[in-house]
Every structure is written in structure tokens, then in C-alpha cells.
Amino acid sequence: MSMIHVNTTVNGDEVDFVCDPRETLLDVLRDRLSLTGAKEGCGTGDCGACSVTVDDRLVCSCLMLGAEAEGKSIATIEGMATTEALDPLQVKFIEYAALQCGICTPGILIATRALLAKNPDPTEEEVRYWLAGNLCRCTGYDKIIRAVLDTAKDLRADAGEAR
Amino acid sequence: MPNDTQKISVKTTDFKVVGTTPDRPDGIDKVTGRAKFGADAYAPGMLHAAIYRSPHAHAKIVKIDMSRAGALKGVKAVVTRADFATGLAGENWNILENIMASDTALYDGHAICAVAATSALIARDAIKLIDVEYEMLPHVTDVDKSMASDAPVIRAGTADKSVPAGLGENVVRYHESGHGDIDAGFAAADLVIEDTFKTEATHQGYIEPHACLATLDTDGKGEVWCCTQGHFNVQKVCAALVGTETSQIRVTASEIGGGFGGKTVVFIEPVALALSRKANRPVKLVMSRSEVFRASGPTASASMDIKIGMMKDGRMTAASAVYRMQGGAFPGAPMEFTSMCGFAPYNLENVHQIGFDVMTNRPKQAAYRAPGSPMAAFAVESVVDELCNELGLDPIEVRLMNASHEGTKASYGPTFQRIGLVQTLEAAKAHPHFTAPLAENTGRGISCGFWFNHGGETSVTMALSEDGTVALSVGTPDIGGSRASMGQMAAEELGIPYEDVRVTIADTATLGYNEISHGSRVTYASGLATIEAARDTLKKLCKRAAAKWGIDEDAVAWVDGCAVPSGANAGDFDPLPIGKITRSMGRTGGPIVGHYEATPEGAGVSFATHIVDAQVDPETGKTAITRYTVVQDAGKAIHPTYVEGQFQGGAAQGIGWALNEEYIYGTDGRLQNTIFLDYRIPVASDLPMIDTVIVEVPNPGHPYGVRGVGETSICPPLAAVANAVSGAVGVRMTQLPMTPPHILSELGKKARAKKGGANG
Amino acid sequence: MQYHTPDSFEDAVAIANAATGTTRFLAGGTDVLVQLRADIVTPDDLIDIKHIAGTHDITHNADGSWTIGVAVTGAEMSEHPTLKNDWPGLVEAMDLVGSTQIQGRATLVGNLCNGSPAADSVPAMIAINASIDITNATDTGTATRQVAAADIHTGPGKTSLTKGDVISAVNIPAVQPNSGDAYLRFIPRTEMDIAVVGVAVNLTLEGDTITAAKVVLGAVAPSYVTVTDAANALIGSTLDEAALDALATAASAACNPIDDKRGTIEFRTQVSGVLAKRAAVIAYARAKGANT
């Protein structure tokens, strides 16, 4: 089995790795780059626990090959907090108890950040449909949705002040 | 799990930390991706394992040929049943037989052998090279069919002594309980309704598949890292199954990505240990999602007959039930819990229930949040709803009239102590949801639910640091935010800030035995143990203060985090804060450590009442849950936000069970929906916000009145949703899940009956 | 498995023709990767076509038609500023495929070539007479032929594509005046399911009267069904109750479904009619200029 050498960017840092062509991006992140924040809940793109962004596009890393990462820019949960502080979404998720077991949380945070980048003022329905591919079995989604809507409100207020 | 009496003084007011909502100690780890779950571990030299599973529902294993797999480059070890302990009996034998078949594949997905290789891909490739020769056997997956006299026999001679003569070989356990004279009760009733109900098996559906990393050295010492609800149980079972002493295996519980009962069970850890022993290297084993569905424990499925008699004013005169539950190819379907829970909400003079535990060619059932109770509530509460409809009575008033209360002789025997069912019904009645107008094609369902809750073996230690902060070690994996509630209870007792307590889930080598995190026992039992360990710690702190002041120990009290002189002759000393005592503890007698070990038995039972609105599209049979309210007695909510989370999570799981979740078997006995695409748990857009009302009727068995809250919340939703849907479509729905094809088919039958009636 | 990244369709064709084992093309990978991960299909050669120029483009041609590159994702179609003004039904149908994450990768061509009779975008493509460019080798090099979208899928897991065929573009015709398309599907949840029934309707009006119609069903037969009787029920009508009822009857009559884990024969047959009516109402409103 010939291995493939891949150069890519993860959370702003240049990295390279060698992988089997069958390895998914999720396999590579977890097993070759030790970034275990993205989780494999299903391996079929149905649960969203492996969510990352690739060139700012939200995807399931279990449904992309590691080899496809060549030249791309990948963002994972490990890059969400800055050196100074947690992302406002991360803070709000803790405050609202928008997580119980926490296995879906990295994927939901990445997905939510992608939503708010695209739509800073989503309705409850828009949040629910955007996150329909992120399964959570603990919370019934209630506190997740509230945390997202409240973060969005705070961010809009901050943006308003900044203007 | 009866509600034993225990004399405890219950504090219900003047809390400083309990009842607040601090951030959970594992919060930052879990929002940054740093929290380490089962599959996140790594060890130098680690191998990856994979398990070969039966593609057949029932087949004799004639021959296992692993030569091609073993010869694959990178494969380092293979194991079969021959690599595990022999001579096991009882449940250990059942567990081993379930995780590694001996001579017969008992269900689709049954493990038959395993490999360890240098990469996960090679391990998967090796599995494809395993050749197993089978001799097909007839199979049965339906509970009623399995009870029939001509059903294929799963394992002759399995039945225990409880089973009456004359039943099929697949009926392996039997339960019967009740009191009064049901015949007289039914004879006295104005209306008796009898109906039959069925529920399909559902899966706990935790998002994290089972995962472990295990090492078993040649000297018999082992290490296991795994996602489990009970690592002490993993330790015990692993030791037995690989044939070593319990203390030689050290088990550390990882963060756990959901369990809901399904991770109380051992599936893969002994396999990884056996492979490690053969390869002499650490072995990581992670289930795929389809393995989780095919081979880890779903719930039992149920077939139930319910009969209830009622007077015109709503008073129940008698109730009886027969519950037939299949729990897969092993004994264990929770039919005794089903039997005991069904009528528990009602104060009945005449009540009788029978349960059958039936084996089929399905995976061994595992606990799922109040195991057995939701099915019973579905059947019983549906009949109560139908009685209310027929007699034109209010569903909450009828339940209030018949509600169990303190002093009621429970349907399953004991007498209830202080309970909160009436309070949940009153709160539901007062909730605006109950009287809100209903939209078109919408029904409103009400249901009560009951769960025992549990205590169990518990051990806690509390070590003080020199700066007066606290390291609290508990042995119950945190499955719902319990580190926060333990920290709160410790801080409350010690009179120190919540932030000064660091809570750790200790491994099996550093703490006494702890029963699994199940039975909604953690906040109750580990909480009680934490409070008692804190009190033990305070006694030791007061003793140091007494020695410093040269007064009697009894003359020192603990107030707001400080030792203070107490009583007339104690003398006049400045309060001595905890930090001052600990700073000098090395010189005043050494480290200060409090601890508590016991088996608390005062877990207070818990009740809930749910209200749900369900809108059904009459043309497609599709149901939308448009409003949901959970009212539940928590005894005392230590962390109210996390209590709400438990209420909401249980409701959401119950909604899934009611509407779309089910195990679908083909005629070949193979599971057809082994991925989340087809095993349809609720997604975010399926649900509304879930309102919660926390009722607090203190449990007399806990120092702060805590009752378990994790499980009761899944008991009412099946029935509540079924009652709402039945109301919306005008047909009594007696089978779960109420999928669109199922509802549309019932609507079609109704329309045809109406037409036929009109014509005839 | 060999992973290839050709930068031209000619190279892709050459690799595909030289391959001797199982070959798969990789665009979004939302089906290929699932099959790979579950060890259902492990290709010997996996040809990633995303490095080929133009595969990511959505082009509005001078004649009003559209060319959609084979690697264009559902999300890119939804985000396109004007495509959905012309063909809202097509864009919605593609948008129904999977989650937000799947939308970030999944493509029209992948949805078509996976061979499922229940793909959401396929009835929508057939209803609007989309065609597919297929490139393959000839004696003198390579050539591209155009095939109707309706002629690709032939049965469960089967397509009419042959060895070396590489799909190189999707052609969407120019929208006619006073026309509207719509697609609806039935799933038990609100998201994340495979269609139990899918119905695409494309209508053209003159005044209030329907002059042209196409009704295509998915998930109710071994392949997609273009229901001529259903179209005839609509043509000449103003979408009155009688026409809608006739449409529903024709749609249900055209079903030849199976009982499976996703739905029953009875259910699929009945709901086909229901959804056909609902989709027709939307398409009609769109043809009248409603922005729905």
C-alpha cells in the first residue's frame, strides 16, 4: 500500500503527514496529528461529531480523505480558543449547560461558528436546521439552541458597539 | 429496589452553594476538544483491534479459520473463545458468551473472533480474511413468536426456577406481584378497558461508540482505559473473563460520551486484554457505529396486555397487566421492573402483574434509562387515557384522584414514604401549557411516569491540601455533570467556595469499590457519601482546632468554613479558617483526609408528569412535536440547570422512542438499520424547546433531600406522545414507534371502517 | 487503493480506461467514503476529479442555460445568487440531500451516479430536462456526448455508464417564461433521512392555464418514473381540484415500490399522490411569479 505525503494547514499552522490513501481526514487528524477533538460517532456523515471546516466550508472529516487535504486550510476545535480566551460560543456553552457528555460538543461548536459567520442573526428554526446534522443524545438540543441564539445576540451587540 | 427506611436529618433550607448553577469542572476541557474520551487514548507500541462478527441470526459455528488473517502483514495476534477463562458460571458466563461466542452464533453481530494489528486498516483487512463455516439454525426475533411452542429454542435449560411449568424453553424468568382481589375490582367497575400494546427495541444511541485501550502483561497485571459507566464493574468482569485476580487489573474511566445505561455493560475490554496478552503489546479497540447497533445492548422489546377498571367518577377499581419482554439471546429483559413500575403511580386496592423474560436471536439487552419502565408507562397510561376519553373525564383530575402518595401501598409491595407525584400533577395542571388552545390536527397527551432510583455500594475520599482546598475522589463516572454537584455538596458542607473543590473520578486502584453510575444513583449515593466524607473531614478539622485551643473536641463547631468555639465553657478564640488548620497539618498530626464507605439504601422514588402537543399531518401520517413540558420531582435540585438537562434529555429520547426509533429485522433475522441514517434519533429540527418544572419534595433518605433525576424523565414520554397522537388522529395507537406509515395505515383503517359503517 | 488526481478529463478517462479493478470517481465523496469506511466498496482506483479546471464552476450561458461543474457542491448551488431564481426546485432538491456538512461536499453528479432510486436531486434534474456531458475515449482521442439525466439511472445501484465514462458537466436548460419547478420529498424526520417518496414537478403556463408539465417520482420504483398521465392531468387545467385529484391518482398509479425499512408499498403509493399535489401547487405559484 503506497502512502501519500500531504502538505496542509491546520488551525493556521503548516503541517505535513504521510497517510494511506484510504485514511479519512478524521483518521489523520486523530491518529497522525494527535488532534482528537474531532470524534468519530458514526463514520457515515450522520452525526457531525467530526465536523471541521476546510477552506472555511463546514464538512464531516469522516467523509473526506486525508489525501484531499493537500493545500487546504483546516480548522478544528483545537484552534477555536485564542491564546487569550475561549471563543464566546465556548463560554456560552458552558454557562448554558449546552453540553452534558460533551462528545458532540466539538462538532456542534465548529458547526455553530460556521453558521454565525454566514448568518449573524439566525432564527431558532435556522439554527435547528443548520445543526440537524449534529446529533446530540443528551440535551434534547434545548440548551444548545438557547446558547447559540444568545451568543449570536451578544456578538451582534458587540459588532454594533464596534461600529 | 425498595425504598428502605433510614433515619436521616434532612436539610432543606439556607443553602449557600447547593441550588446555584456554577460552571462544570470539565467544561473547558469539553469545549476545547481536550477532554479525553474512550477512543482518544494512545500508548507506545499500541496495536489496533477489530472483531469478526456473525452475519447470521442463529448458526452453529462449525469451524473458524484464521490462518489467512493471521498471515497478513502487520497482524500480531488473533483470539477466539479459547483464549478466555473457562469454568465461568452465572452472569460472567453470559457476558463472556455474549462478547465471544463459544459454539453458536446467537444473533446478527455476535462476536466470534478478533485480531490485533499495527493499524486499524490492517485489522479491518484481516477481518475480511477470516473464514468461518456455519451450519444455519432457525431463528426467532419477535417476543410473541419466541414464546410459541414451536419456536426455535435459543438455549435449552436456561430457565430459572421462577418459570412455571408448561411454558416454552425461551421463557427464562417469571415475575408475579400485586395485592387485593382484581376480579372483584373489575366486577365493581363501571367501565373496564383491556388492550394489547407493543413496543420495538430501541438503542441508547450514545454518540460515542464503545472504546478501550488495554494492556495485559505476562505477569498478569493489566491496565484498562475505557468509556464506561462503571469502571469497578469492568475491573471485576475483565478479571474473571481473562482469568486473573480483580486487583491485578486497574481500570481508569475515560470521559464518557453518553451511556444512558448502555455503558453499564462490558463488551470489548476483555477482548482487548486477551489480544494484548497474546501480542504482549497495548491494544486499542473501538467499535464502529454499526457494531454498536448490532452488538451492544438495545432495550428489550415488549408485548403487553393491560386491563383497568374505573368508576364513572374516575376512581380506579382494579388493574392487571401481563408484560412479555424479549432481551435477546440471554436472560435479563427487565420484566420485573416493567411489572413493578406500570401501576406504581396509582393507589390501587386491587392490582396484579405478571412478567415474562423471553430469549430471542437478538443482541443481549442492556439497561436504558429506567429500564423497563417506559414500556409499562406507555401501555398503562394509554389505557388510563382511553378510560378518561370514554368517561369524559379530565386526564389530570383522574390521575390526581388515584395518585399514589405517602402511605400508599405500592403496586409492587412496599409502602411509599414521602413522594411527589401529586405535586407534579398539580404543577402540570397549573402550567399554562395544559390549558393552551390546540392547533388543527393536534392532540395533547398527558402521562405520569415512575422510577425506583437506587443507592448501591459507594466510596468517597476527601483529601485536604495545605492551602485549604479539597481534592474529592469519587468512583462513579460523571455521566451528567456529577462532578459539579459533588463539588457543590462538598463546598456546602465545608463552608468553602465551590471553586476550592477539585473533583476527580478515581481509578479502581485508588478508591474502594463503587457500583456503576446507574439507577440515577450518583447524585443521591455519591452525593450522600460526599456529604458524609465532608462531615468526617470536619470532625478531624475540629479536632485539630480543639487541640490548638486546648479545649474539648465537642466544644468546637464548624461555621462558614471555620472552626469556632461552641458552647458555654468553650472559651473565647478567633474563628480558625480551614486554610489555617491545613497549613499546619503536617505538624499537628499529619494529612487530613475524610472518607465514607457504605451502601446507602434511602434512594427516594421519583415521579414525573409530562404534557405534550403533537400535530399529525393527516395526509402523510407525519407527527410534529409542537410543545413539550416536563414536570418532575427532583427532591432537591443540587444544580438546577443540570437537572433541567436531565429532564430535557429524557424527554427527547422518549420522543424518539415513541415516533421513529426502532430495531428493524429482516426475515433473515439480520438487523437492517445499523447506522444513524436509518436508526432515526431526533435531530435538532425535530424538536421544540422543552419546558421544565422542577418540583422539590425532599427525599427523607438523603441529607439534602436529593432524589435521582436521570431516569424518570424517559418514563412518561412514550405514553404522553401516544396519547397526543391518538387524540390528533382519533385512533388509539397501540404500537411503537408511531412511524408515518404506521399512522397513515391506522388512519386508512379508520376511514374504511367509517365508510363501511356508513354504507352498512 | 490508488488515489489519482488528474488535472484534465482526458487524463481521468485514461486512468479509468487503464484501470482493471473497481474504479470510483471522487467529487464530494459523501457516498464513496461511506462505502469505503464500512468496507462495502474499496476501489482499486479512486479518481479525484476536483483538480480538473472548471469542475467547481456554475456558468450561466449566453442562451440562458446553465452549466454546472461536476464538483459543485449543494452549498455552492444554494449560495449562487441567481441559479435558484431560474430553477428553485432543482436547488431545493439538492439542498435536501443530507446535513449542512454533507451540503459542503455533495454534488449533483454524485447523487446521480450513486445509483440510488431515492436521490433527491435526480427527479428534479429529470423534471427540468437536464442533461449530462459524458467524456470517454475514442479512436482519435476523447469525445464528449450528451445524455439526458433521465437516461443515466437504470435500476437500484445501476447506471448506464460504461467503462471509461467520465461525467464532465451537468447542463441545465434555460428557464422558459411563466415556468416553475418544485421538488418535495417525504422523510419521517425533518432532516437527515433518505427520501421515502420524492416528487418533482415542472410547469409552464399561458395565463392561468398549464401548457406544459412534467412530473417525476423518486423512491417509489426501481428507477425514477416520469409520469406522463400525471403531466396530462395537469396540462390544460388551471390546477383546479379535479386536476389535482387526477394528478394524485396518476402519481399513485405510477408507483411500483417495495416494502422496506424506510416505508411500505401502501404508504409510498398514497404519499406519492399527496406530494405530487403539494409540489404542483408550489410549481404553479412559482410559474405565476410567486417568490416561494
Image: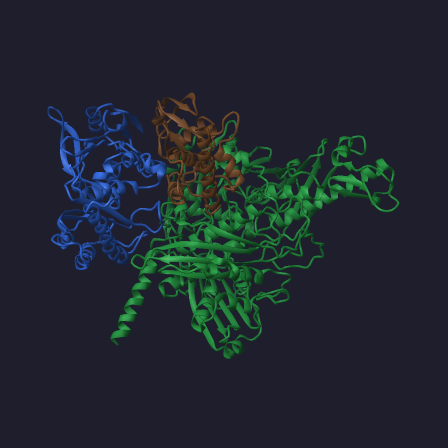
The answer to whether residue A95 is left or right of residue B595 is: left
Label the blue chain with its letter.
Answer: C
Query: Which residue appears farthest toward the right when viewing the image?
Result: B569
Q: Is residue C142 visible?
A: yes
Towards the viewer: C22 or C70:
C70
Towards the viewer: A39 or B727:
B727
Q: Which image quarter holds the C terminus of chain B?
A: bottom left
Figure check: B717 above or below B33: below
Where, by quadrant of the figure, is residue B603 drawn?
Answer: bottom right
Label the green chain with its letter.
Answer: B
* Horizontal and vertical percent position of residue B523: 61, 48
* Horizontal and vertical percent position of residue C128: 17, 42
* Horizontal and vertical percent position of residue B348: 56, 70
Q: Which image quarter holds the N terminus of chain B?
A: bottom right
Q: Is residue B298 visible?
A: no
Where, by quadrant of the figure, is residue C253 drawn?
Answer: bottom left
Give the colour chain A carries in the figure: brown
Residue shown at the point (49%, 68%) measured from the top left: B321
* Horizontal and vertical percent position of residue A35: 47, 29
Figure check: C263 above or below A130: below
The answer to whether residue A32 is left or right of residue B228 is: left
Where, by quadrant of the figure, is residue B558 drawn?
Answer: top right
Figure check: B660 above or below B47: below
